[in-house]
Each structure stands twice: as C-alpha cells, then as structure tokens.
C-alpha cells in the first residue's frame, strides 16, 4: 500500500503505482522512486507544496520520505508497446533518514541549543524502528535552528 501525506503528516490518500524502486540501507540514507498514473487532481495536490510518500510493503516493513521533485512522463522508460499507456507522474526522493541527515537532533527537543545539558536525552524503546525514526523527525524537524 502506498499513500501520501502533506507537510503536516496528514494522510491525503492512497497512490496507485505502475512501478516502484527502492534502495534502502540499515544506517544510511536510502532512496526511492515510483511512477504513478497522471491525474490533474493528483498533480495539483503535489504542486501545492511539500509532500511525503509512505510505502507499506505487505506489512513486512514501511519506508518512505519527502518527494524531492515530482515530474511528468508520457511513457514508461524502456517499456514495450504493450505496457500501460501514459501519462505518468514520476516521484522520487530520499527515505525518512534524509529528513534528519546532516541536521542536529537535539537530546532535549523542547529546549533551545544553549539550554541542552549533558544529561539530556530523548530515549525510545519498545517500538518499531520506523516509529522511533518518525518520533525523532517530528520532535526535531520542525524545530528552528539558531
């Protein structure tokens, strides 16, 4: 199942896809790309601002991330003439780790930089890894850095 979210992480609906490719790593930023059938409504939603794509792969694992640049394609690259007719929207981006890569993750997200202490921490336990990553993203990505 693939769905997309707005920049406030509110689900906007499911996405039907024609193809999906992902290169995921255990502890490094991965990438994903997909082709979805074109509709004016979907294109307009995606052009309205930042959005996040999330893929639940048969309940085994979940990945996704911010779409860096949606594009338009009139056919599937390398496909034979019997393939699904276009047009298509191409989506791609880094996985969730790309949202926090090269950013400071504050040990105490509610405190300013100067108020951080050596004892500060934001531990998580007894949850799936993607839930923990989403926790750190939501606690740190909206934070203003000074």
Image (cartoon, helix red, strand yellow):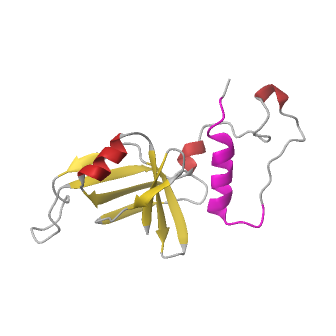
Quarter of the figure with residue 32: bottom left
Q: Main secondary structure of the magenta part?
A: helix
Tell me which residue sits at (29%, 58%) in the image: 35
- Location of residue 109 in the rendering, given as x and y in whole percent from the top left corner: 75, 40
Viewer-proximal residue among 39 and 136: 39
Residue 138 part of the magenta segment: yes
Looking at the image, residue 55 lies above or below residue 30: below
Residue shown at the point (51%, 61%) measured from the top left: 63
- Measuring 59% from the left and 60% from the top, which residue is drawn there? 26
Residue 30 image point, x, y percent: 49, 54
The answer to whether residue 49 is magenta is: no
- Vertical relation: 123 (above or below) 111: below
Q: Position of residue 84 (x, y in %)?
A: 17, 68
- Residue 39 falls left or right of residue 145: left
Q: Is residue 141 above or below residue 122?
A: above
Query: Total number of numbered labels?
Result: 0
Identify the residue at the far top of this view.
146
Does 109 appear above or below 89?
Answer: above
> Which residue sits at x=67%, y=41%?
140
Give the percent coordinates (x, y) of residue 111: 79, 34
Locate the N terminus by quadrant: bottom left
Query: Is 51 placed left or right of 132 in the picture?
Result: left
What is the residue that sits farthest to the right in this orientation? 119
In which quadrant is the C terminus drawn?
top right
Magenta residues span 125-144
Q: Is residue 22 left or right of residue 107?
A: left
Compared across the picture, whether 86 is left or right of 131 comes to: left
């Amino acid at each position: 199942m693939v769905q997309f979210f707005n920049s406030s992480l509110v689900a906007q609906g499911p996405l039907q896809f024609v193809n999906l490719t992902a290169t995921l790593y255990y502890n490094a930023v991965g990438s994903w790309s997909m082709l979805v059938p074109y509709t004016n409504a979907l294109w307009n939603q995606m052009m309205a601002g930042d959005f996040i794509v999330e893929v639940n792969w048969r309940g085994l694992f979940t990945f996704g991330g911010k779409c860096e640049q949606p594009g338009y394609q009139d056919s599937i690259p390398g496909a034979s003439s019997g393939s699904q007719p276009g047009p298509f929207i191409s989506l791609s981006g880094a996985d969730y780790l790309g949202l926090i890569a090269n950013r400071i993750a504050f040990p105490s997200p509610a405190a300013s930089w100067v108020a951080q202490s050596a004892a500060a921490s934001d531990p998580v336990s007894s949850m799936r890894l993607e839930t923990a990553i989403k926790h750190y993203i939501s606690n740190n990505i909206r934070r203003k850095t000074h």
